[in-house]
Image (spheres, rainbow, N blue to C red):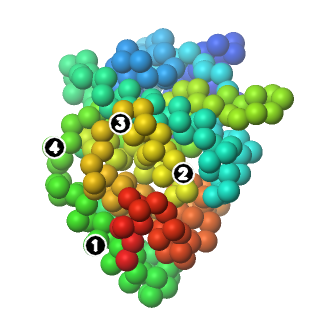
Amino acid sequence: MPKLGIVNDIWSIGGEYVLRIPSELEYVDSLYVESVAAPAARNAGVRTPEVVVFDDTLDLIAVPFMVTRMEPGKTLGATPLSPTWDLAASEWSAVLDGLGEQLVCLHQKVKSVDDPNGRLNPWWLDSPDESLRRCIESETLSLDLATWVQALIEKLHTAFDYDPDGPTDHSVFVHHDTHPWNIMVMVPPNGGKAHFSALLDWGCACWGDPAVDFAGFPLWALPPLVDAYKLAGGVTDETFEGRVLYMWLALALREKSFLDPNVFSRHWWRMPTDGVNELKYRLPMLPKVWSKWTL
């Protein structure tokens, strides 16, 4: 039986290779994106599995498929590392440091992508407004909290020098789906810190704003991850953290309004465990480059 992912069904082949087949026809396009994005990232030095085979002839099966080399370790989201504020700087530090370095490599060293058939995605950004409306209608958020969130969205909107709902002049190559289930880590069997191993799943890749590659992590992981990125030479400006928070909030609200918690049991992934109340409480306590965006 395959391991079921959200987008692909996954088989291990001899413990050395991974076979990936789109689980639904709607996900075929994502595999096409990955077929050009993953090699470009790997050729630039990003640690990601090598694509060994990409077959879209439909001679063997009715959909395209991909075979990659298997990376050692496990996904960060599948580790027992507790997603708490107290462990952000200790248990996760080596992982976040390694990821920060890899994102610098991705954003600065991928200068072009061999994409003759135009497989890459255009730039897009989730808008928080529709998700917030759905949260209000479903009473997922109280009216008071929803009013606070709306005011925060409006403030974060000022961090952009482009229209978040339109194209952007920011033109680095981005993964656009960086989160704990797309990060491979190695966990020492006899204790010690986990460390970064590889970045997986390039089906959302495109050219766009580098801030998007931070938005898929828990709120408490954002400051140390962005710090690691800056330390490794990542280019930011005074509005960078505001854009990260806007994109983070858009994803968190989308998860809260659209995803079935019985299937997507990743409540800590973006929205804090205590929801908007925790966001409202924690944001002013973050370093100044972050807290300046609170209300």
Quadrant of the image containing the N terminus: top right
Q: Mark 2 and mark 1 in contact (Cβ < 8 Å)? A: no
Mark 2 / mark 3, whichever is N-terminal:
2
Residue lying farthest to the bottom in this orientation? 144
The residue wearing badge 4 is 169
Residue at the spot x=56%, y=15% of the render?
69
User: Which kind of residue does numbered mark 2 sit on?
Assistant: Ala
Nearer-N-terminus badge (1/3)? 1
Question: Which label sits in the foreground, 1 or 3?
Answer: 3
Residue closer to the observer: 52 or 44: 44
In the rendered view, would you say 91 is above or below 249?
A: above
The answer to whether 260 appears left or right of 152 in the picture is right
Give the residue at mark 3: 234
Q: Mark 4 or mark 3: name the one nearer the start of the chain.
A: 4
Secondary element under disc 4, as helix, strand or loop, is: loop
Q: Position of residue 265 (x, y in %)?
A: 64, 56
Horizontal relation, residue 50 to residue 29: left or right: right
Tag 2 secondary structure: helix
Say which residue label 2 marks. Answer: 221
Q: Which is more toward the observer, 276 or 130?
A: 276
Task: Single out the mark in the foreground, 4 or 3.
Answer: 3
Foreground disc of the pair 1, 2: 2
Measure how far apart labels 2 and 3 are at the Cα level: 17 Å
Q: CA distance from mark 1 to mark 4?
A: 21 Å
- Earlier residue among tags 1 and 2: 1
* Alpha carbons under labels 2 and 4: distance apart: 27 Å
Residue at the disc numbered 1: 154
The x and y percentages for residue 113 are: 26, 22
Q: CA distance from mark 1 to mark 3?
A: 27 Å
State the image coordinates of residue 111 (x, y, percent, origin top left): 24, 23
Mark 2 or mark 4, whichever is nearer to me: 2
On the rendered image, what quadrant is the C terminus found in?
bottom left
